[in-house]
Image (cartoon, rainbow, N blue to C red):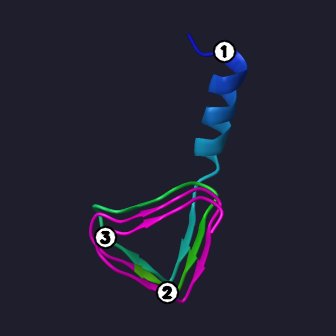
Amino acid sequence: MPSPIYLWSKLLRKIRGAAIRGSEVDPTSKVEPGSSFVNSTMGRHSFCGYDCEITTADIGHFCSIANYV
């Protein structure tokens, strides 16, 4: 069973939310909490990890962007 500290840290990470401004993200795609997604588009079934800074980008379909990019 995971420790309470581990579970608490996971919960805090999810609560932060993502900053999506002036962008279009397909409903099948996901931008993780802590990421900033500004003036960009994201195609179908794509993923952007935690704590990313994406500005003025056109991300295609089926793309995965790692954490901290």
Q: What stretch is highlighted in magenta?
A: 42-69
The quarter of the picture where the C terminus appears is bottom right
Disc marking residue 13: none
Q: Where is residue 39 in the image (x, y as percent from the top left)?
A: 52, 86
How far from the left and from the top, in percent, is residue 43? 31, 75
Amino acid on which disc 2 is placed: Ala
Q: In this view, does 34 lie to the left or right of 5?
A: left
Report which quarter residue 53 is drawn in: bottom right
Viewer-nearest residue: 23 or 31: 31
For label 3, the residue is 26
Residue position marked by numbered label 2 in the rendering: 57
Q: Are marks 2 and 3 in contact (CB under 8 Å)?
A: no
Q: Which residue lies furthest to the right in this view?
A: 5
**Who's the residue at 60% across and 58% down the image?**
67
Number of numbered discs visible in the structure rendering? 3
8 up-or-down from 69: above or below: above
| CA distance for labels 2 and 3 | 14 Å
Residue 24 percent location from the top left of the image: 39, 78
For label 2, the SS is loop
Q: Residue at x 64, y 43 (%)?
A: 13
Q: Which amino acid does label 3 sit on?
A: Asp
Q: Which of 12 and 65 is in front in this view?
A: 65
- Compared with 33, 54 (above or below) is below
Left or right relative to 23: residue 19: right
Residue 3's disc is 1
**Structural crowding at the residue carrying mark 3, measured as other residues with C-alpha within 10 Å and reported as few (<14), some (14–19) or many (≥20):** some
